[in-house]
Image: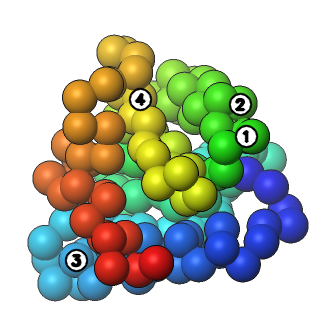
Amino acid sequence: MGVNAPKEHQRVIARLTAELFFLYKKGLVCYEPLPEVMIDESQTSATPDVILFDNKNFTNKVIIEITTPPAFKSDSEKVRLLIEKYEVAEGFIYDHIKKRWKKHKYGRGEIIENPSFCDSIGYDLNTLLIDAF
């Protein structure tokens, strides 16, 4: 949720957005992937790295934050707070250096088992990045 993101950070955002957009255009996922948009357009708000947006119901379904080891813990807390505040179904944190995922679900907290699997779209987000780097 920063302004001056390094190339590796942007590369992961681009890859996730591109792969998810391909699935969206093919009708394989129902939610449009949007990179770095405000979570609440009615006011100045946080801008997660990727949002999966439900255009029919005008709701954010999933947020994804790309991070590094030093910021993993604080970004995880930010995502947790955002999904609770904005009632987002799922939130993910991906450390692109250590290649690890963390997942939070609205009303349930952290999900330990299969932390890269997105229930909202039925895809493992990690598989979208496997051959990328």
Helix, strand or loop at label 2? It is helix
| Distance CA(mark 1)–CA(mark 4) | 16 Å
* Residue contact at pointers 3 and 4, CB within 8 angstroms: no
| Distance CA(mark 3)–CA(mark 2) | 30 Å
Q: Which of the two labelled residues, at mark 2 and mark 4, occupies the earlier sequence position?
A: 2
Residue 128's spot in the image, x, y percent?
A: 31, 70
- Residue 81 against residue 46 in the figure, above or below: above
Q: Nearer the viewer, residue 32 or 63?
A: 63
Q: Which of the two labelled residues, at mark 3 and mark 2, occupies the earlier sequence position?
A: 3
Q: Which residue is mark 4?
A: 104
Residue 89's spot in the image, x, y percent?
A: 35, 35
- Judged by depth in the image, the label closer to the viewer, 2 or 4, is 2
Q: Which mark is residue 74?
A: 2
Q: Residue at x 41, y 80 (%)?
A: 132
- Judged by depth in the image, the label closer to the viewer, 3 or 4, is 4
Give the amino acid type for the residue marked by disc 4 in the picture: His
Q: Which residue is mark 1?
A: 71
Dot 3: few (<14), some (14–19), or many (≥20) neighbours within 10 Å?
some
Give the amino acid type for the residue marked by disc 1 in the picture: Ala
Dot 2: few (<14), some (14–19), or many (≥20) neighbours within 10 Å?
few
Q: Is residue 10 left or right of residue 2?
A: left
